[in-house]
Image: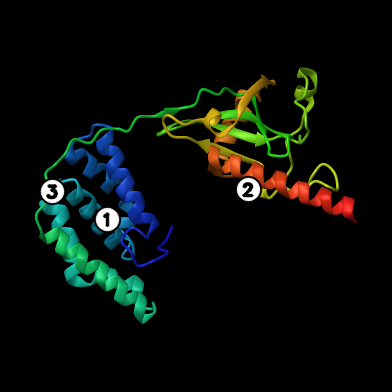
Amino acid sequence: MGAWGPGLWSDDTASDVRATYREALEDGLSDEDATAKVLAEFAAELADQDTSPVVSLALAVSQHDRGRLTGEIGDRALEVLRSGADWRRWQDAEPRVRARRAAVLARVGDQLAGPQPAGQPVRRPARHVTALKPGDVLAFPAPSGRFRLLAVRAVVEGRHGAFPFVRLLDFHRDHLPAGRELAKLRDQRAGRGSDRDRPAEPWWSVDSVVLHSRGRDFADYGFKIIGQVPAPPETEQEKLGTSLASYSGWQFWQEYLRGHDELLGQRLESKRCG
């Protein structure tokens, strides 16, 4: 946890406070209960002189943005600004960084002292749920006419949806595999190919949880279900959901597989010319 810049939300703790408060309201908690939840979950940070100002400012601004700023939370934040408590973390920063932080705090003070927007109902966003199932195998036709395959190893359930966890299979041919061959294919390993002509796969390109938005899914990016293989045991699927390599979108996979196909073509052409 830490800050990566002088902005109010350029801080893990501040961002977590905002998300916790928003999600509490989305879940139907009252203003008082949502505030109490934040204060309880960030009790350790509030007890620390470095992070306490961060929590107070983040909660106050989060409340004000939604027209829900209470006198107690507002007073806490204004006391942070008045006392200079936030400056402890920035005393060794470069002058230009301190100047930017000062500007951020000035804007926060102006906002909290000004009128609040009208309070609006907070609704939980719709969950995006994939139609894919563990064991599904997707084919992508690359520009060369060869196919790359992705296997769905798990479906990861989260607050915002159910998303497929896919792995790239060790397959790059100009025809689709038969059913028996499909079941024998292995996951593509990171850092090496299956033969000396195959470019190595970077670690972040062999698997990911694939996020998608409503109305656009795998078929919109050229992927097609071609069959099914046995899904991993449920215990293994649960592990995949808690030890994720990366997050991506279908557009990432589309662009990556196209680029990888082009790279392979260049290597093969270079080998022929050599």
Quadrant of the image containing the N terminus: bottom left
Q: Which residue in the structure is indicated by mark 2? A: 204
| Mark nearer the viewer, 1 or 3 | 3
The residue under the point 28% across, 56% down is 55
* Residue 10: percent from left, percent from top: 37, 60
Amino acid beneath label 3? Pro
255 lies left or right of 7: right
Give neighbour class at mark 2: few <14, some 14-19, many 20+ (Cα, 10 Å): few
Amino acid beneath label 1? Ala
Give neighbour class at mark 3: few <14, some 14-19, many 20+ (Cα, 10 Å): few
The residue under the point 60% across, 40% down is 254
Give neighbour class at mark 1: few <14, some 14-19, many 20+ (Cα, 10 Å): many
Residue 135 visible to the viewer: no
* Residue 99: percent from left, percent from top: 30, 77
Q: Which residue in the structure is indicated by mark 1? A: 58
The residue under the point 39% across, 78% down is 92
Report the number of numbered marks: 3
How much space separates mark 3 and mark 2, taking CA atoms? Answer: 43 Å
* Residue 170: percent from left, percent from top: 76, 36
Q: Label 2, secondary structure: give it.
A: helix
